Image: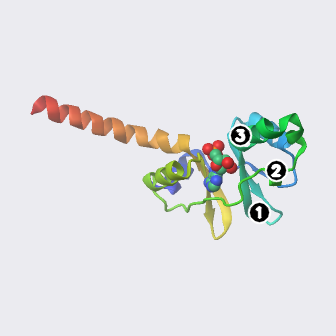
Amino acid sequence: MTVAHILAEKGCSVATVQPERTLDDAIQLLADRSIGALVVTDEAQTVVGIISERDIMRAVALQGAAALGAPISSHMTRNVATCQREATNDQIMRLMTDGRFRHMPVCEHGKLVGIVSIGDVVKRRLPTLEAEQQAMRDYITKA
Ligand code: AMP
């Protein structure tokens, strides 16, 4: 299973936001779409950062409600890990686990073409795990 397969199933739409918008705007977008992160892009649609619910929670914990008026650029992560369509499910699961993040934008020739979340990855991994578990049970009971 590759990222291309996941995107073919779930679609390629990505929620983006501009860096000069505020954390309050980000919260509204996240709530409206029931998602956990927004990819931050400039006018050329180049990825310049990512802001997740965790960044907003941290900003509010440190600065209180005043943080909600701050620009997204001041709280986003700038060094964004991205992957390509050819990456496998297992590879991105490893990258997310090691990097401790749950969202992975997909880029092709420097342009954003989709996003994969940890939920997308785990959902596709479960049937394989269940099949492996069943094979192990069969092996044990028939031995
Ligand atoms: P998340 O688990 O996705 O809510 O994000 C946890 C932290 O990792 C936040 O500080 C995010 O800004 C950051 N983050 C999320 N996705 C990525 C990514 N693909 N590359 C780098 N940092 C990320």
Q: Which residue is mark 2?
A: 72
Residue at 46%, 56% (x, y): give it: 91
- Residue labelled with disc 1: 45
**Front residue of this view, candidates 5 and 79:** 79
Q: Are marks 2 and 3 in contact (CB under 8 Å)?
A: no
Is residue 6 shown to the viewer in this render?
yes
Q: CA distance from mark 2 to mark 3?
A: 12 Å
Q: Residue 100: x, y in percent? A: 56, 47
Front one among 68 and 50? 68
Q: Residue placed farthest to the top in the image?
A: 141
Q: Is residue 116 above or below residue 81?
A: above
> Viewer-proximal residue, 12 or 21?
21
Q: Nearer the viewer, mark 1 or mark 2?
A: 2
Q: Earlier in the sequence, mark 1 or mark 3?
A: 1
What residue is drawn where x is 86% and y is 40%? 68
Instruction: Report the side of 137 relative to 2 (left or right).
Output: left
Q: CA distance from mark 1 to mark 3?
A: 22 Å
Residue labelled with disc 3 = 53
